[in-house]
Amino acid sequence: MENREENLQKIWQALRAGKRFFIAGHLNPDGDSLGCTLAMTSLLERLGKTVYAYAAPAIGNDLQFLPGLSKIHVGILPEKPDFDTVVLLECSDRQRGGDLESILTQAETLINIDHHLVSDDYGDINHIDSKASSTAEIIFQLFEQSSPDNVLPTPDEATCLYTGLVTDTGRFVHSNTTAEALRVGSALVALGADVDKINQVIYFTKSYIELKLLGRALEKMEMRFDNKYSQIILTRRDFETFGATPAQTQGIVSQPTMIPGVEVSALIKEESDKISVNLRSRAAVDVSRIAQTFGGGGHARASGFKVTGKTVNEVADALAEVVYDVVKKLD
Ligand SMILES: [Mn+2]
């Protein structure tokens, strides 16, 4: 990407030129993926475009408040894809959005917008800005390059983008909380983002089951490697005990990094068909590299991966070996 502004202007021209759009984020949509899909959908509809917005199931309870959510086809792909322009948001490779290949290949223009450290140039136009805190930050910058239309986000679009910004920066505490992230956040608040609602729903609402599961997780927390590594294993039995699902574990993996000295925290979940792992780093370790060892990815301080065909303990052991090699070099 030679020049950020020019590249965004190029994307804006492609959006103006397109007529029939397909918009999607990644599997297991988070606040950034979904917020950007919704903001982009609303924006394109305002420009008079036809939009098919798609998200893979399931959408978390904490994101159900997002304005315009009913417009999204959750898990339902179009029967006869006929799109001139496809926008993939937050997808570090072309498979990240799910089984979309037939849709991606039939489009004249594929636009790829992402902020992950490792991302393929699979689009006709690629905008990969690993310095951006979130894709939401990039979409706001796109609005700023929307000449000659000079469109600004509506209050609902601002709410969607602000949600992406706060969730990806962990409420403006992760290392990606740059001056630019705060500038964009400030602009979105000025444009009418519903900050109070976002904070209430995403950060101050937990179900009884989620709190019980958090209790179980903390009980099972293990400290390893000179207390530099914290590991929590939640088995299928743990989920069954509380009638909980693996999706109800948000925030758990970050808890151990509050303990001074813990550099890497892992939450290892036994799901019905796979083992999924969330990783967090306090600062010194780039956990995206650890995740890549297992075919996953993400950010330096927040990453994850999934494994099939192995038991939860096999995954935990294999992960511990990799983590050990990384943390033993720290002193
Ligand atoms: Mn993101």
Image (cartoon, rainbow, N blue to C red):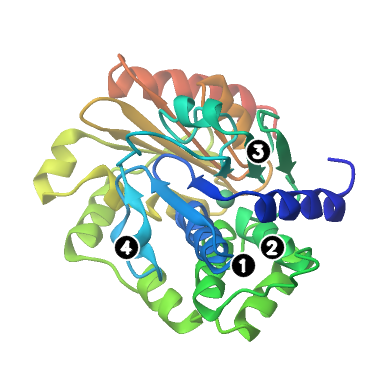
The residue singled out by tag 1 in the image is: 172
Q: Return the residue nearer the eye: 135 or 211.
A: 135
Marks 4 and 2, the one that precedes in the sequence: 4
Q: Determine which quarter of the picture holds residue 177.
A: bottom right
The residue singled out by tag 4 in the image is: 70
Measured Cα–Cα span from mark 4 to mark 1: 28 Å
The residue singled out by tag 3 in the image is: 285
Marks 1 and 3, the one that precedes in the sequence: 1
| Image spot of residue 133 (x, y percent) | 67, 56
| Image spot of residue 326 (x, y percent) | 63, 27
| Image spot of residue 36 (x, y percent) | 54, 57
Measured Cα–Cα span from mark 4 to mark 2: 31 Å
Query: What amino acid does circle 4 point to?
Result: Ser
Q: Is mark 3 within 8 Å of ligand 1?
A: no
Q: Do the CB atoms of the residues marked 4 and 1 lie less than 8 Å apart?
A: no
The residue singled out by tag 2 in the image is: 177
Which residue sits at x=10%, y=45%? 241
Query: What amino acid does circle 1 point to?
Result: Phe
Which residue sits at x=52%, y=47%? 21
**Looking at the image, is 37 positioned above or below residue 221?**
below
Which element is circle 4 on?
Answer: helix
Measured Cα–Cα span from mark 4 to mark 3: 40 Å
